[in-house]
Image: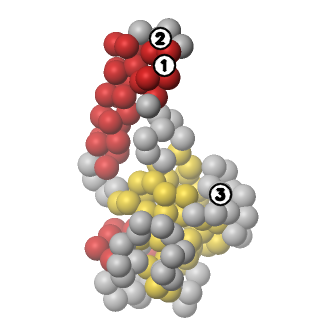
């Protein structure tokens, strides 16, 4: 669809196809990065580029900083510093809370450096990676 619109606007077809190939390559590169996991995240308020509603993407940890990369966009990502875990608030994802999310998904809450709460929803097979550097402080059976 995008290629057709670009063609109607007079943009060369080779440029449109190159853009699509670049987006597909970036998505594969981001997904295959060590430590990356598919997730959805939201905050209790507006924090950087993270919305208050669920936003899907590829998450990863850089020490105690959580990075959410929105795919297939070229640049949008959000990086937030995490202070710790919100104790006792780990829960199962409710049916219909996030569309097209797998069975057995869990919501992991983290306390941001600003005092807000970041919730990361992950599928069951990615829970151990999603805990990141806070795995010892978050006793969740995975």
* Direction from residue 103 to residue 99 in the image, left or right: right
Q: Check contact, mark 1 vs mark 2: CB within 8 A.
A: yes
Q: Are marks 3 and 1 in contact (CB under 8 Å)?
A: no
Q: Which mark sits nearer the N-terminus, 3 or 2?
A: 2
Cα–Cα span, label 3 and label 1: 30 Å
Q: Is residue 80 above or below residue 95?
A: above
Label 1: few (<14), some or many (≥20) within 10 Å? Answer: some
Colouring rule applied to residues: secondary structure
Q: Nearer the viewer, residue 98 or 130?
A: 98
* Residue located at (41% from left, 69% from top): 101
Q: Earlier in the sequence, mark 1 or mark 2?
A: 1
Q: In what element is the residue under mark 2?
A: loop
The reply to whether discs 3 and 2 touch (Cβ–Cβ < 8 Å) is no
- The quarter of the picture where residue 140 lies is bottom left
Local crowd at mark 3 within 10 Å, few (<14), some, or many (≥20)?
some
The answer to whether residue 115 is visible is yes
The x, y position of residue 51, in whole percent, is 65, 57
The residue where tag 1 is placed is 6
Q: Secondary structure at mark 1?
A: helix
């Amino acid at each position: 669809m995008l290629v057709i619109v670009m063609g109607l606007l007079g943009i060369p077809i080779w440029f449109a196809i190159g853009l699509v190939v670049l987006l597909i390559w970036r998505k594969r590169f981001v997904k295959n990065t060590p430590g990356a996991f598919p997730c959805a995240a939201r905050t209790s308020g507006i924090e950087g580029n993270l919305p208050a509603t669920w936003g899907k993407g590829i998450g990863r940890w850089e020490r105690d900083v959580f990075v959410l990369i929105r795919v297939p966009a070229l640049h949008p990502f959000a990086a937030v510093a995490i202070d710790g875990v919100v104790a006792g608030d780990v829960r199962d994802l409710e049916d219909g809370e996030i569309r097209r999310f797998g069975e057995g998904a869990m919501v992991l809450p983290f306390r941001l450096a600003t005092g807000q709460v970041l919730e990361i929803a992950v599928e069951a097979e990615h829970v151990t990676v999603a805990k990141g550097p806070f795995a010892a402080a978050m006793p969740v059976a995975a």
